[in-house]
Amino acid sequence: MIEAAISGLLQVLSWPAFGFLLIGGGIGFVVGILPGLGGLTTLALMLPFAYAIQEPISAFCFLLGMHAITGTTGDITSILFGIPGEGTSAATIMDGYPMTKNGQAGRALGAALMSSLVAGLEGALILAISIPIMRPLVLFFGAPELFMLTILGITFLATLSSASLSKGILAGGIGLAVSAVGIENHTGTLRYTMGSIYLWEGLSLAPVVVGLFAIPEIVDLAVRGSSIAESRVEKISGVMEGVKDTFRHFWLTMRCGMIGVLVGAVPGVGGGVSQWMAYAHAVQSSKDQRRFGKGAVEGVLGPGAANNSKEGGNLIPTVAFGVPGTTGMAILLGAFLIVGLTPGPDMLTKHLDVTLAMVWILVISNVLAAGVAFLFLSQLVKLTFVRGNLLIPFLVVFVFLGAFAANNDFADIVVALVFGVLGYFMVLFGWPRAPFVLGLVLGRLAERYLGISLGAYGTDWLLQPTIVVMTVILLGTVSYSVYKRMRTGGQVVEGGVEPE
Amino acid sequence: MKIRPQTVFGFLVFLFFGLVIWGAWGWPVKAKLYPLVIGIPMLAMAAFHLAMDLREGSGKKISSPASDDLPAAIPADIQFTKEIDPVIARRRTLDIFAWIFGFVLAAWLVGLSWTIPPFVFLYLKVKSGEGWPLSIALTGAVWLLYWGLFDQVLHLPLPEGKIHSWLGS
């Protein structure tokens, strides 16, 4: 493993991989700060570049480096303007924004950035430690277990990513069904190709994801019609005080980092939840809980730590089982397939260097992000005043160029447009997009595992002890979700929920 | 009974799974197994969802989740801005979709290379009312990025427009 770790590090630091890390990190940095442009949208927009990069470690340097940094810089706008730069940065507002109003913006930023760095490194370390522990477990799993895991992953994501259980599950089902488009390998049957040769190979992930995520965000940007950050921020000072706060409350930072890792490792729970849980822990573990919500630095340290460490946790099920914990990881899972890697046992044996390179990417990008943010904090804040109208034509052009880059086929542009319209209506009516993407990504794998299971065991595999346990977990998850909704709303709740 | 837009969407999802099953029915077993394994339970769930939606639309009150229910209360997806007047929001939505569809149509007719600069310029100058210098500068920046990245670095073979084919060039 040490050899693979050294090999992974050297590959990350080699050219052009490190160059891609810098480019991806730079994009993630700016995107994280801009409130109107989400990290997910950018990750989706940049996914087609994986086709062009092809080399796995370079592709992950670009995509994972970008993804890891958006969370760190997303906290900046949460603290300064009370508007989350990222959906997962919302909990930082609770005490970060009051600190700004109390004239302690610099201290809050210093605390958020340093706690993000410390916990980000903690997340990467836990990911590295977990690999030898996960390996025997993953190698024990055969096709039936892997099939059940794909279904479990989609169910987890479906039950937790929407106020409506049925919408979440149906969204996952649509993704699974869409993945069936194309030639069926065993019989050569053309499935749902509608006479189009373009569809023989199935739908490419990149144009679908680009359209699904970017177009609704462009529409929202156009509807808002202005920059989000409307109030000017005075000179930022006291950053070092915030850095010292991280070490004054070091164990709180580490505990909240651990919460981020653990929650991040549970498929479907997502980054937002880990931040709120860390915030709740910071409040509960404080002797004076009345300070929270009014500008307590612990209320910034907790979410700041969890926000970054969750990436390490998220990668554990994504790499080991192909079951991503968040939408970002679901998109990243697409990158695995684009560069020719299959998540699962191979990632812990044959491609262990790639897995460990991911750990290094997390470490290096976190250190770079924190360093650059500290150096250029005042200048970076000015980025938040860019008007949405100036961003829109850029985004439209790059959405369709990105989609086209997948196969160099105009049909990809049409696919991006169609799924953009679908994505718009999904967001409008509160249908979560993450289970859809996961269904699409895992659909082909699920079909392969199902085919192998039936071929090898007939229907007997359904009675294997591991499958029975997984089925019980699956049913338990759905039942608990239904029970929880009935308890909170009287019955299964339909419709979206208001953002916190 | 008033049919709500989300009910229509739910019906389309129901129809989608119906078509998934109907399309797969005549295929060999190996080809239809997966679509049917997915399609049949999903059709049942879509029907249940539709029934719930119709019931809600008929006036039966559905409560909101409790705010202290942390995981369920945090949306895992974006939500559209609600601060804008719905009439204005609808107009702006149609407006931006018209621009997006216009971009795709123009790209199909004259090719991406000939669409990108005029699109960016017109959006900035006409739609957003930006000044000439900013509109020209940003159009140049987008073109430069497009040319540098997609043409020079990635060597993306951008297709000619249909008009070029019709003119036989």
Image (cartoon, coloured by chain):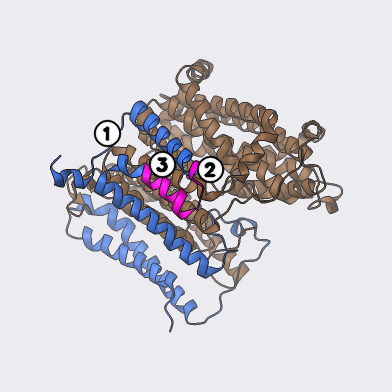
The answer to whether marks 3 and 1 sit on the same chain is no
The residue under the point 51% across, 82% down is B59
Instruction: Give the CA distance from mark 3 to mark 2.
Output: 15 Å
Q: Label 2, on which residue? A: A39
Report the amino acid beneath label 1.
Pro
Quadrant location of the C terminus of chain B? top left
Residue A177: image location, x then y, percent: 32, 54
Q: Main secondary structure of the magenta part?
A: helix
Report the chain holding disc 3: A
Report the chain holding disc 2: A
Residue B123: image location, x then y, percent: 43, 50
| B118 inside magenta stretch | yes
The residue under the point 32% across, 50% down is B104
Q: Is residue A210 visible?
A: no
Furthest toward the front, the residue is B132
| A37 inside magenta stretch | no
Q: What element carries label 3?
A: helix
Q: Label 1, on which residue? A: B157
Q: Specify the segment rendered in magenta.
A: B117-133
Report the amino acid beneath label 3.
Phe
According to the colouring, which chain is brown? A
The residue under the point 51% across, 70% down is B87
